[in-house]
Image (cartoon, grey):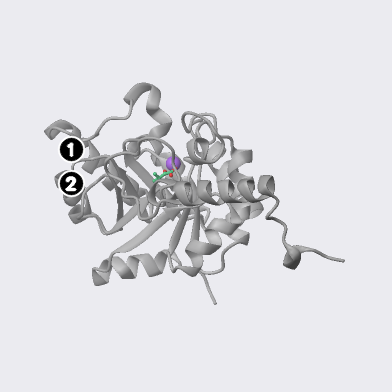
Amino acid sequence: NRRVTVHDLAGAKARGEKWPMLTAYDAMTASVFDEAGIPVLLVGDSMGNCHLGFDTTVPVTLDHMAMLSAAVVRGTSRAMIVGDLTFGSYQEGPVQALRSATRLVKEAGVGAVKLEGGERSLAQTEALVQAGIPVMSHLGLTPQSVNTLGYRVQGRGDEAAHRLVRDAKAAQDAGAFAVVLELVPAEVAAEVTRSLQIPTIGIGAGPDTDAQVLVWTDMAGMTSGKVPRFTKQYANLRQTLGDAAKAFAGEVVGGAFPAEEHTFH
Ligand code: KIV
Ligand code: NA
């Protein structure tokens, strides 16, 4: 009964096996995905939007991340748990990155951390890997930079595509064990995937990456309003949960709940 390791994921790439990753922000949901056999769960700073009610990932703190990562670790026994380094918790340099990542490893028990940026996060990646902390890199649309990038497809055009390949190689050379590619053209993601020995994980990056990640609330139809075109809704939990709440409310108001079998005498 051991958790998925970076070696398992390297083996999957060598064998040409694709694998899924989902986000999780709490123990109960994480346990569902763990039982479903999802090998890697990301405690993404998308918790800002999906769990904490912020508009972006920017306000999420390392305290938020440590608390929810610990819950996800407690709720699972098999998946590799990856915790996002939050905005402002690694940009100062390798020392700060090491302090933040160490906290997530020791306090929350995550098996790996993720940080945004290739070349710009090179020193941080090297420091963490040297300390024995597996690092997942995140390239393309990096939501912590929403104020400079907006939410647009990245890596369009030769220049930007080359920069993305360079960033991915920099992450690999620094020792990253995987690279997330968010919102990039499928052709560019395919080229990055061919160029790397380590697995690529796509989100809005077409079908040719080694793995695919979705934000669980989008994937399960829990998110309200419009979801990005690259996501797919495999359930309509928002409807199901809303219906359950309305049914409960109706039975309380009508006096049907609690019935005799729910009652002690
Ligand atoms: O925070 C997050 O959910 C992520 C994934 C979209 C890769 O970083
Ligand atoms: Na993230």
In the rendered image, the vertical position of residue 109 relative to residue 99, given as above or below: below
Figure quadrant of the N terminus: bottom right
Residue 15 makes an appearance in the image: yes
The tag earlier along the polypeptide, 2 or 1, is: 1
In the rendered image, the vertical position of residue 99 relative to residue 106, given as above or below: above
Residue 79 makes an appearance in the image: no
Which residue ends up furthest to the bottom in the rendered image? Answer: 1
Residue that numbered label 2 is attached to? 186
Could you say where residue 24 lies in the image, as x and y percent from the top left?
Answer: 50, 52
Residue under the point 43% across and 50% down: 216
Residue type at the position of mark 2: Ala
Work out whether residue 261 or residue 242 is closer to the camera in this orientation and state it. Answer: 261
Residue under the point 50% across and 65% down: 34
Which residue ends up furthest to the top in the rendered image? Answer: 147
In the figure, is residue 123 to the left or right of 160?
right
Could you say where residue 37 lies in the image, as x and y percent from the top left?
Answer: 44, 69
Residue 29 sits in which quadrant? bottom right
In the rendered image, the vertical position of residue 257 relative to residue 2, given as above or below: above
At label 2, counting other C-alpha atoms closer than 10 Å, the crowd grade (few under 14, some 14-19, many 20 or more) is some
Work out whether residue 65 or residue 178 is closer to the camera in this orientation and state it. Answer: 65
In the figure, is residue 115 to the left or right of 10?
right
Residue type at the position of mark 1: Ala
Work out whether residue 103 or residue 238 is closer to the camera in this orientation and state it. Answer: 238
Could you say where residue 74 lies in the image, as x and y percent from the top left?
Answer: 63, 61
Which element is circle 2 on? helix
Could you say where residue 25 lies in the image, as x and y percent from the top left?
Answer: 54, 49
Residue that numbered label 1 is attached to? 161
Residue under the point 37% across and 48% down: 174
